[in-house]
Amino acid sequence: MRRGAVALLLVAAMAGCESARPVEAPLWHAPAVSPSAASSPAADAPPVKATGAPSGLLTTSAGTDPQGTTTRLTVQDIRTGRPTFAATMPGWPLRTRLARQSFSPDWSMVVWDDACEVRLAKRAGDGNYRQAATWRPPGWNSRGDGPLCYSAPRFSRGRVWLVVRPSSGGEVGKIVSFDPAARGSKPREEHAEALTLDDKGRSATSMDIAIGGRKGSTGTLVASKQALVSAEVRLTTDTDATTIFYVCRERLDDRTLLCLAQGPGQMFGAVALLTANRAARTVTLRQGVPKVEGGIRDAFLAPDHKRVALQTNDGWYLADLSSGRQPQRVFPQLATEGAEVQFWA
């Protein structure tokens, strides 16, 4: 599983907070690449250190500089796998989990959590990120549940939103936000009825669900009254007690989630689409992508929610989710093979 189930709540808590207006005109363009280079990415091709928001698959790996251990950020072109953008940020890569909303809309800032603190770095003149602010929780809470912990920071509405709760875990907590331009500012409590929000910042709850037409199959759905956020489903086959798991992390629209099968069992293919009837507490699944060679190891949804990049043992493929056509192989491997893919920027 690319993201552990334990992290589902925290990821879902902030997955929908971003509502900042998208950039209408692109701030950054990848250099043109000849078709002959598409099938053989060059690992030594110098990536571009540029301003603005890049486009492609963001990977993280370990790096070092005179300031200490850093995380190397590389964006690979979605058609060729070649590096087109590179930067470093402070911190340990194995502790750093990034999402689209970890970056400000123009990529001038990035936020992440580390040991219950939230850190912010800004892009410097050399294109790399330098730490600019740290927000630490204010000790113990009034309930005496234990030391407080900040987690799951995301940019939203020009501020940094995050979850604050006792470090011992549990549901007790709240959502607060900081002004990234005011380093000494106090947190502002955001009025949310739950720690989980949909993409418009509306409170979402977790509910047990049944799978339409599958007796004995169950799951958990996180949704607000208006939109889905995430889901995990467990399917039992008709012939035996074998259980097939799907984890749904990315949202195509208010009614549809993109799901990835965990393990070899694929009742609805390796990539499935889930729709829900919240009133009846039931969901249905259907195959989202035709079968490809090598088996699908991971899937990354495009920012436009219309395509998905598929990582297989045979290479990388692109699939159009609306056409149903066979996915097309675009390159054999990333030029930074071994780095961890975080998301499709």
Image (cartoon, grey):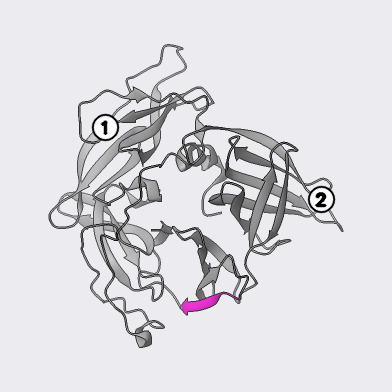
Amino acid under disc 1:
Asp
Disc 2 marks which residue? 214
The crowding category of the residue bearing disc 1, from other C-alpha atoms within 10 Å (few below 14, some 14 to 19, many at least 20), is some
Mark closest to the chain's N terminus, 1 or 2 = 1
Q: Is residue 268 left or right of residue 133?
A: right
The residue drawn where x is 46% and y is 35% is: 201
Residue 14 appears in which quarter of the rendering?
top left
What secondary structure is found at the residue carrying circle 1? loop
Nearer the observer, 181 or 232: 181
The residue drawn where x is 65% and y is 72% is: 291
The location of residue 79, given as percent across then percent down, is 41, 74
In the rendered structure, which segment of residues is drawn in magenta? Answer: 326-330
The location of residue 121, given as percent across then percent down, is 23, 44
Amino acid under disc 2:
Arg
The location of residue 258, given as percent across then percent down, is 58, 55
The residue drawn where x is 20% and y is 31% is: 183
User: Circles 1 and 2: CB distance less than 8 Å?
Assistant: no
